[in-house]
């Protein structure tokens, strides 16, 4: 387990045992046995899935960028297929701050758009 953040804002990252399947609008868009779980302060845990384990054909990079004082700069993707679209539903820290470097190359998904199911 990796620990980062501060005493008032702790961050822990650890591997998720088993597999994580990503479901968007009833379609599997990824599955990974290498996902990480990031627990940050009082927020709900978030699964970070390696980019290689996600079908990137459904993702389109957007111009949105936000900054977290603990993790760094986040870039966003929209999900799309045909007429279906969910803007800025995915984020990634391509160059995360020290201490949370394990999430580099991983994608995270807003749970109101994508269901991250633990399978097996």
Image: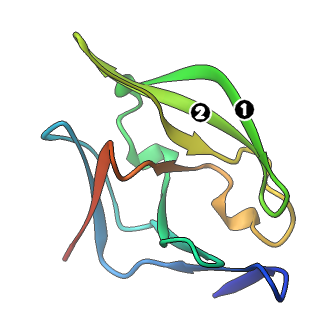
In the rendered structure, find residue 30 and report the number of the disc placed on it: none
Residue bearing mark 2: 76
At 44% from the left edge and 48% from the top edge, which residue is drawn? 109
Q: Is residue 71 left or right of residue 33?
A: right
Indicate how the structure is coloured in the image. Answer: rainbow
- Residue 76 vs residue 18, the one in the foreground: 76
Residue bearing mark 1: 65
Residue 10 placement: quadrant: bottom right
At 77% from the left edge and 59% from the top edge, which residue is drawn? 71
Please, what secondary structure does the residue beneath circle 2 have? strand
Tag 1 near tag 2, CB within 8 Å: yes
**Separation (CA) of disc 1 from disc 2:** 7 Å
Q: Position of residue 90 (x, y in %)?
A: 49, 40
Q: Position of residue 111 (x, y in %)?
A: 36, 53
Give the number of callouts.
2
At 45% from the left edge and 66% from the top edge, which residue is drawn? 35
- Looking at the image, residue 9 lies above or below residue 35: below
Q: Is residue 4 left or right of residue 17?
A: right
Q: Pick out the residue farthest to the top.
A: 83
Going from the N terminus, do you reach mark 1 or mark 2 first? 1
Please, what secondary structure does the residue beneath circle 1 have? strand
At 56% from the left edge and 81% from the top edge, which residue is drawn? 14
Classify the position of the N terminus by image quarter: bottom right
């Amino acid at each position: 387990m990796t620990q980062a953040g501060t005493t008032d804002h702790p961050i822990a990252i650890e591997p998720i045992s088993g597999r994580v399947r990503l479901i968007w609008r009833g379609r599997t868009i990824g599955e990974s046995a290498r996902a990480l779980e990031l627990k940050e302060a009082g927020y709900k845990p978030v699964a970070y899935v390696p980019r290689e384990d996600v079908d990137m054909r459904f993702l389109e990079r957007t111009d949105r960028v936000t900054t977290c004082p603990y993790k760094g700069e986040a870039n966003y993707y929209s999900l799309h297929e045909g007429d279906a679209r969910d803007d800025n539903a995915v984020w990634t820290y391509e160059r995360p701050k020290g201490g949370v470097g394990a999430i580099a190359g991983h994608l995270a998904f807003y749970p109101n758009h994508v269901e991250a199911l633990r399978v097996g």
